[in-house]
Image: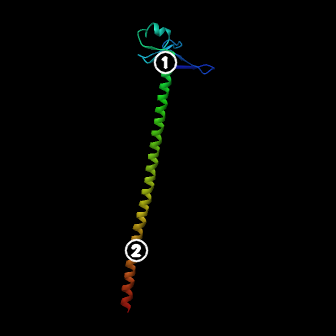
Amino acid sequence: MIYFYVNIVKKVTIICEQHSSKAIGFCANCNLYVCKNCLINEHKSHEIKEEDEYNKLKLKTLNNFYELLEDGKKAKIQVVQKVEDHQNILSLLKLLKDDLQLIEDFKSLGNILYFSSKKLEAGSSKKI
């Protein structure tokens, strides 16, 4: 875990995880910030980046992280849009189902009226 301390002028000081000392470089081999003790011992044969160089790397990492967040946000928006689209489709399907039920009801009513009119015609022709 990397600890960040911010002083009054907003300069970030990175602390070495292992020795709790101020980091003075970045070990490219281990992908860790290192202090003087690290340079002398564990990381002495490793590729160490200078402060400006690892600051650029930090910025690049933060930018990549920001891009991932933005991509995630866009993906979330697309998912929400798809859910809303599906909800709209479901609402339309319910309306179509209701319309089909109305059509069936009208057909049944039409049949009733048709057969009732036929009975009336048959009844009036018998009386004549």
Most foreground residue, 112 or 77: 77
Identity, as a three-letter code, of the amino acid under mark 2? Gly
Which element type, helix, strand or loop, lies under badge 2?
helix
User: Badge 1 local density, few (<14 within 10 Å), some, or many (20+)?
Assistant: few
Instruction: Identify residue for label 1.
Output: 53
Quarter occupied by residue 75:
top left
Q: Whole-Å distance between the Cαs marked 1 and 2?
A: 84 Å
Determine whether, in the image, residue 60 is placed left or right of residue 119: right
Query: Which residue, as the protein is rendered here, is positioned at the far bottom?
Result: 128
Query: Which residue, as the protein is rendered here, is positioned at the far right?
Result: 8
Q: Which mark is residue 65?
A: none
Give the residue drawn at x 47%, y 39%. 74
Identity, as a three-letter code, of the amino acid under mark 1? Glu
User: How far across and how far down the image is residue 6, in percent?
Assistant: 59, 20
Give the residue drawn at x 37%, y 81%. 118
59 w.r.t. 114: above or below: above
User: How far across and how far down the image is residue 94, in percent?
Assistant: 43, 57
User: How far across and how far down the image is residue 46, in percent?
Assistant: 41, 12
